[in-house]
Image (spheres, coloured by chain):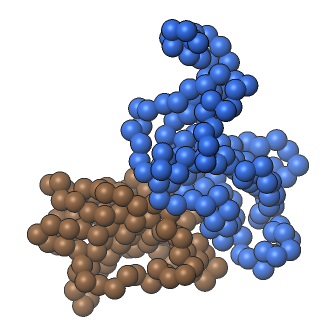
Chain colours: A blue, B brown
Amino acid sequence: MIEISVEVDGEQYRLTVGGAGGLPAPLESLPDAMVPLLLAALVELGPRPTRNPQAVRMAKAGVPTVWVRAGERRWRIAVGEPGGSPTCVLDIVDAADEGLWTLHASPVVPDDETGDLVPGEGTVLRPITSTDVWTWISHHIATCT
Amino acid sequence: MRTGFPLSLPDGWRAMGPTDGVHMAALPGEDGETPKAVVTVGPSDEPAPDGLDAMTLILDEGEVRCRGGVPARRLLTAHPQGERCVTTELWLVAGDAPANLCAVVDTIYYARLRPELQRILRSYRP
């Protein structure tokens, strides 16, 4: 049994899958095997332009407006034991025509003046494809349902 | 391994057909009955495979290339089939020998089989 937490634009949904009575009332008749489709629909997963995998976007911690631009959507899928801390988390910035990006902690940040990378607590965004996201869902969720 | 099949199939896959111009190969499941994945090669004027309906989510699309640089349009979709969730890779091959390549896989196997399915579809040789 796993617990899946999905947060989309500040709205949080919680599903317990793999045991009796896992899904919330409107969805309780849905077979567990449909959970990947449900998640994909919740986060509006779909075709996005493919970015160069070498491309990155960086920002310092605490200044999210630097990297979350107008029109971009954030969502997170977290998987773990019911009641426990998530063991696998996928953090996405959905930049529509600019593609999907995953968020990772970074030990370096761009210097304000020179733009050089210097030690600091920051965030790096790397491009990811919709296929990669579906593969993540297949690996972390479909196999548990 | 070449079997007369228009795709290169790794060990474990079983080629069948062609039937009505459609080649098919399957990767048997553990129970020996329900396959983990099926690939088909059909004419480019074949109708869309089962499942491309209102319940189908189009997850990704883009340009890919088969062997020899032959261009193809790729669609990744998912849909319910009975009590299962099924993932489909559809490659619409253009060029001198257009064809529809289709890989259908139970979503629980998609992550594991994705590299193999990509290699199989990329190997298309008319």
Q: Is residue A18 above or below residue A90?
A: below
Q: Nearer the viewer, residue B78 or B7?
A: B78
User: For this view, does B40 lie left or right of residue A123?
Assistant: left
Residue B26's place in the image compared with A18, above or below, is below
Is A102 located above or below residue B9 in the figure? Answer: above
Tell me how many marks there are.
0
Q: Quadrant of the N terminus of chain B?
A: bottom left
Residue B5 lies left or right of residue A129; in this view the side is left
**B47 or A140, which lies in front?**
B47
Q: Residue at x 37, y 69 (%)?
A: B90
**Location of residue A88 (image quadrant):** top right
Q: Residue furthest front?
A: A70
Q: Looking at the rendering, which quadrant does residue A144 occupy?
A: bottom right
Residue B102 location in percent, x, y? Answer: 35, 72
Q: Residue at x 73, y 42 (%)?
A: A87
Give the camera-side residue of A57 and A89. A57
Q: Please name the residue shown 32% across and 67% down the image.
A: B91
Image quarter hosting the C terminus of chain B: bottom left
In the picture as drawn, the residue positioned furthest to the bottom comes out as B20
Residue at 45% in and 69% down: B88
Residue A121 x %, y %: 68, 18
Whether residue A108 sits left or right of residue B35 in the image: it is right
- Residue B118, visible in the rendered structure: yes
Residue at the right extreme, as displayed: A83
In-front residue for pair A57/A131: A57
Q: Visible in this render: residue A135? A: no
Q: Position of residue A110 (x, y in %)?
A: 56, 16
